[in-house]
Image (cartoon, rainbow, N blue to C red):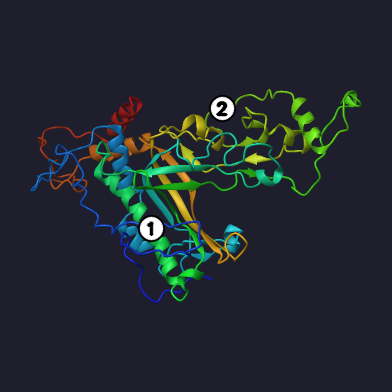
Amino acid sequence: MPATRSRGRPTVGADAPITTSAASHHDLPTSPPLSPAPSDNENLPRSRTASSSPDPCSNPVPTSPMDIALLYSVENICTTLKSISDDLAVENNPRPLRNVMRNSAEYWVANDGNLWHLKFIAKLDTTGHFTKMGPYFNLQTGGIDLAALQKARAQIELRPLDENDTTYPAEAIRSSRIAIDTLLAMCSEVEQVRNAKIPAENRPSVTPFLKSHLYNDSFSIVVHTEPLFRGLPNPQSAETPIMARANIGQSNALMSPSKAKAHAIATTQPSHRPKKPAGSRIWQFDDMPDPESRYASLKNSHDLKDVTVQSPDVFDTNGVFIHAAEYNTKLHDGQVMEVDVILRLWTFKPGLKDVNGSCIYQVMLQGMKLMPYAEYVKNNLVRRALPQTPDCKGKRKASESPCNQSPSKKTMTLSEVEDVANMQVDEM
């Protein structure tokens, strides 16, 4: 049942303890008290730190496409402390959304009743233990059946930017920090409320939002896609391996289910489907790369021509869609991304594995954009190139002169500014 709050939401970033069952094999991360977030300038190199009394018309202007794109994302897209305070519902959160999500999980919602989105900056960790981006995603090694295929999803491990990432703007580092603090706070809040009257030894085991890494004293975020394959036949239906009439009696032993699967793989003809063009959103099961022929037996035993492979909105720097089947070839370790996720919680009753039940917190991927995202660079260049008032906080009036510009100098029109921005983006 959803938690009922009698007190306000803990402050994001507070050291709210999380307690778990002593018998749990999912230990929650413990960390020292989180100090208040430093100012945006605190972690910047000296050359980037603003002076104590800056001239309103001499603020440093980012010049690299990466800085321009990150600042645009942080200022216009990413979650901020204010948006958490204004948008994230305090009461009855998380809550079930069975009619909308078609499952029994609970989701964090906004004040308007819609799903709440957490958006932040992070780096890809494609070599991480939890990353499953290959052509077989999170499927176990060995044979693949329909039941396993129904649960196939991509997993991507993300690392927050930290104080060592001085090549990026402090605002982007702060965005990562807010995401980590938020995930800690949301988990803490639920565990505190729901376990308030439960003895420690009787509490459910917990798998938190964040993965902890003792070797370097850090957290990572593992984002999951929804199941990728849609339109699969009923896994309870019997497999009927295909055999040509010409092969009757050709086997040296009595056919069995395992031998039938092996026969199906051995007789599978290589696919000659053309390679999907870049940016294709619609993929069929037959379009999936299968370097180890692990999908082959399914293709021979079931009619999968109508099965589609769907994936979240992931885009490269030029806005070209990247399908889940392409993650392992087009996403690379250390790339900086703008990430859009929703949060959900699964609660399971006691069983043989967890005698007190269990709670699993998940971060569900909705979209990612690879930085520097060209459209952001263009938008920020246009905005910064437009004439501004002397205090550099907005567009100047027609009767005013822009900062440090001679009144006789002609101001560029919006179309001219956009042309210049487009040329700079093309040179990225």
Query: Does any portion of residue 34 appear in the rendered image?
Result: yes
| Residue at horizontal 28 percent and vertical 57 percent from the top | 34
Is 244 left or right of 298, judged from the image as shown?
A: right
**Who is closer to the viewer here, 194 or 273?**
194
**Who is closer to the viewer here, 89 or 143?**
143
Location of residue 79 with respect to 313 vertically, above or below: below
| Residue at horizontal 49 percent and vertical 43 percent from the top | 130
The residue that label 2 is drawn on is 277
In the rendered structure, which amino acid carries the disc numbered 2?
Pro
Q: Is disc 2 placed on a helix, strand or loop?
A: loop
Q: Name which quarter of the figure residue 57 lies in.
A: top left
In the rendered structure, which amino acid carries the disc numbered 1?
Leu
Point out the tag, 1 or 2, that comes first from the N-terminus: 1
| Horizontal and vertical percent position of residue 40 | 22, 48
Q: Name which quarter of the figure residue 249 lies in.
A: top right
Residue 39 is tagged as: none
Is 260 left or right of 119, judged from the image as shown?
A: right
Quadrant of the rendering where the N terminus is positioned: bottom right
Quadrant of the rendering where the C terminus is positioned: top left
C-alpha distance separating marks 1 and 2: 41 Å
| Residue at horizontal 63 percent and vertical 32 percent from the top | 288
Is 344 left or right of 39, judged from the image as shown?
A: right
Location of residue 347 with respect to 64 vertically, above or below: below
Q: Residue lying furthest left in this view? A: 53
Query: Does any portion of residue 415 appear in the rendered image?
Result: no
Is 190 left or right of 135, judged from the image as shown?
A: left
| Residue at horizontal 9 percent and vertical 48 percent from the top | 52
The residue that label 1 is drawn on is 184
| Horizontal and vertical percent position of residue 96 | 54, 65
| Horizontal and vertical percent position of residue 48 | 17, 39
